Image (tube, rainbow, N blue to C red):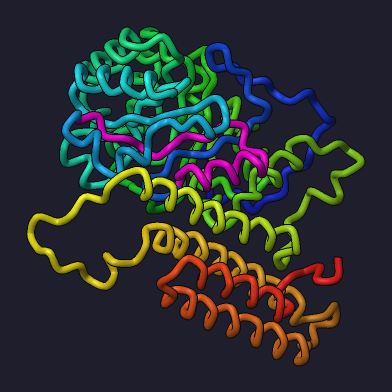
Amino acid sequence: MSYSGKLLDCKWPLTNKKKPTMITIGPYQLPGQAVLAPMAGITDQPFRQICRRMGAAMVTAEMSASKIELRQTRKSLLRRADGDDSEPRVIQIVGTDPKEMATAANYHVESGAQIIDINMGCPAKKVCKKLAGSALMKDPRLVAKIVSQVIDAVAVPVTLKIRTGWDLDHKNAVEIARIAEDLGILSLAVHGRSRACRFNGMAEYDTIAAVVAAVNIPVFANGDINSGQNAQKVLKYTAAQGVMIGRAAQGRPWIFDEINQYLNATPETVRKTNSYEPFLLKKWHISLIIEHIQSIHDYYSRFEANHSLIQSKKTSVIKKEQAVDLAVKISRKHVCWYFNQMLQCTASLRDKRNTDSSGATRIDSVAEENKAIKKIETAKKQFNTLLLAKDQLQFLKHLFSETNLTGDIAA
C-alpha cells in the first residue's frame, strides 16, 4: 500500500508509551527524534538556536559552497561553525568535485564543525545546473568518490542528505544509501520527492521505507511533516529513526516541542494530543518572536562590525534596498512567516468557531476574527517598510502590547 502526504489528515491512534528512540551519530546521542533541516537563507545561527530551545534534537547550518574562491564571501563566512552554536555543530557542504569537497570539509572541521553533512538533496536550479545537490544522484560513481574523499579527510562523523532520485522514473535512493553506508556515512536524511519534483506535489514515503530497510544506520524521513500526528504516522510507516523538519518550522519553531510532546504521549494524554486544535499565539510565543528578532539584530550587527562588506565593482551607487541593514532584511523574512502563522491560526479558529453545534453561523465571531486578520495583514505590510532594526523591535512590541492577538492574553 502506498502512503503519501495526502493521507496525513487521517487519525492514527497512539499506542502505549515506549522509550524514545535514541539516535546516535558517531559520539553524539541525540535527545529526540525531530531535527531541523538545513535551509539556505533560513537556518542561520539565530534560527537554529531558537529551534534547539524549542526541542530540535539537532540543527544543521545552511549549505556552504565547497569552492575555495567563495570561502571569504559574506555568505560563506556566515555559514561557518560558531563557538556559540549548540552541539553537535553540523555544517552542510555542497559541490561536485571530490577533492574540493574534502578540502571544504576539513576547513569547516578546523573552524569548529563537529559533523559534516553532504548535500545531495537540494533541487535548486542554480545548484543542480552545476551538477551539485540532488543532481549528483544521477552519477553513483561520483557520489562514491565524494563520500569517500570527504570521510577520509576528516575525523568527525559524516552524514548525507538525499532525495528519492533524479525523477519519478529514476528512483535510486536505495542504491545511493547502500553506497553511502558501505563507505562510512553515519546517518541519512531522505526527502520524499525526486529532484524533478522540487517541492511540488505530495511527498511519498515508500522510498524512505525502502531505504530504512536497506541500511543499518539512522535514517531521517523528510517532507510534508508539519505536526506531531504527521511525524508519528511517517515514523510508523517508514520505520525511520527520526524526522527532519524544514518548511514547517518557518514561523513555527515550536513545532519541535509539539512533535516531541506527541511522540512522548502516554495513553492518559492521548485525548489531548490525538487531534489538532487551531490556536492563536500565546504570550510565550510572542516573547519568543521578540527574542528571535533581537538575536538576529545582535548576531548580524556583530558580524558586520567584524567583517568589511564586499562592495560592488560595477557601481558606487548603493540602491535603497542594498542600503538596508542585513539584520533588517533577515528579520523581515522571519517576521512575515510569523505573521503568516498568525493568519493561518486565526483563520482556522474563525472557521472552527463560525458554526455552533446546530450549524448556525456566529456573526459576532466572524466580525471579530475578520478584524484580527485584517490587522495582521496590515501589520505585515507595515513591518516590511521599516528600515531600522530599532524600529522593527519597537513596532512588534507595540503591536503585541496594544492588541489582543494572543490566545491567553491574561495568562
Q: Is residue 253 left or right of residue 268?
A: left
Instruction: Name the spot of residue 161 as percent of width and height, x first.
Output: 40, 29
> Which residue sits furthest left?
314
When the figure is inspected, residue 188 is found, relative to residue 306, above or below; the finding is above
Q: Is residue 378 above or below residue 137?
A: below
Residue at 72% across, 49% down: 11
Q: Residue furthest front?
A: 305
Q: Report x, y in % for residue 302.
A: 44, 47
Q: Nearer the viewer, residue 368 or 265?
A: 368
Give the number of marks. 0
* Quarter of the rendering occupied by the C terminus: bottom right
Residue span colored magenta: 43-67
- In depth, the one of 392 and 228 nearer the eye is 392
Residue reaching furthest to the right: 268
Viewer can see residue 110: yes
Residue 104 picture location, percent across and down: 28, 23
Query: Is residue 327 on the magenta stretch?
Result: no
Magenta-colored stretch includes residue 59: yes
